[in-house]
Image (cartoon, rainbow, N blue to C red):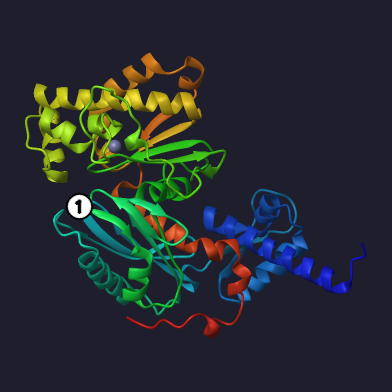
Amino acid sequence: MTVGPVEIGQRSETVRRANLGAIVRELHAHGALSRSELVARTGLTRSAIRSLVGELVHAGLAAEGPATRLGTPGRPSPVVQLVAGSAVVVALDIAVDSLAAAIVGLGGRTLARVRIERSREHSSVDEIAADLTGLARTVLGRRPAAEPVVGIGVAVVGVVRRSDGVVSMAPNLGWRDIPLGERLARALDLSVPISVANEADLGTLAELRRGAAVGADDLVYISGEVGVGGGVIVGGRPLTGIAGYAGEVGHMPVNPEGAPCRCGSVGCWETEVGEDALLVRAGLMPGGGRAAVDTVLREAAAGSATAQAALDHVGTWLGFGLASLVNLLNPQLIVLGGRFGRMYPFVTRALHAELDRRTLPAARSLVTVIPTSLGVDAPLLGAAELALEPLLADPAQWVRPRDTLPELKSA
Ligand SMILES: [Zn+2]
């Protein structure tokens, strides 16, 4: 087969776009880098880096600073970084006890953020869409300048079909088959793409990009307020399953004699480590929410044997479930987010004892368990990363004059 000039032209354009993407992803992940570091990290030539960085600077996506000498011989290399305000996304989070919105710029800088408490009864999709629209307007109004919005990312405490943003099931909200992406896109009216994903999957993404798990290729993240959510990274890639439903670790069957679960099954992991399991064992009413969990933690810190016994129960069952995940997945890191991050100091002993007891020694010796470093905002920051994905995948589509970027309709 002969290759004509058109094909060659198309190929070189494909290569250019891929190379621009590689540079933007490095800068997004690592912050400011010298041109020499970009050469080392991307494998591109010095002249290719100079030319492609020039395009990004011309488009306003990146800026070059004064040259620095990095202890290497030769000419000093200018420092390149992304311009956070050149393209921003709206991140939204529907958590069990709160709603949040943020404006996050290219490079991962949060430019504005707001979180409000949410009553667990206040959970119709109309109420939540209205509240989130209000929060989005608030943060859009707090932008330092009128930075162009290029996407919306939404984290939701439910099982989400990634392809169209339909929430298949969200027991904490009482939702089934809710077209959340479509509803929010209409309410926000920003004329930009919207992506919706499970909050634990997005917490995982945030920990990987910005938090405790930077550099980890094999990771298990578990979180949750009422139940248990999870995200799994295998070989540097998220485990999604065929439709995005993977990682529902809370519904791993762990106890055949256990209690009924909200999913309809019996003895799921969350019936042993979920919020109510803790509260009831600590002598409190079920359904007490985050405040009641914090009461148990305070009592344990003050020396209450009942509170500590309840936490030991949860810690032991955490270890039991994690042992299965460690034996199955051989992760290097387990990050405890949400309620489990707050509980971490009180469950460490029981959790590690159970992990030691039930995990294959070879896999056990390689895994570290740590609490989240991003706290409650992990899913929100992950939603921002999700919304930035199209730009990171193909920044060439944005490498054009600023005034041709999508027009912002509201706020
Ligand atoms: Zn279940």
Q: Residue at x 22, y 53 (%)?
A: 174
> Dot 1 corresponds to which residue?
97
Residue 260: image quadrant is: top left
Give x and y (percent) for residue 86.
50, 73
| Kind of residue at disc 1 | Asp
Dividing the image into four quarters, tell me where ligand 1 lies. Answer: top left
Instruction: Name the residue furthest right.
Output: 2
Ligand 1 lies under 8 Å from the Cβ of mark 1: no
Image x and y of residue 127, in percent: 20, 67
Q: Relative to 9, does residue 265 appear above or below in the rendering?
A: above
- Residue farthest front in this picture: 264
Q: Position of residue 148 (x, y in %)?
A: 45, 77
Quadrant location, the N terminus: bottom right
Could you say which is closer to the camera, residue 258 or residue 351? 258
Task: Determine whether 408 is above or below 285 in the image.
Answer: below
Q: In the depicted view, which residue is nearer to us: 22 or 111?
A: 22
Q: Quadrant of residue 109?
A: bottom left
Q: Is residue 54 left or right of residue 325?
A: right
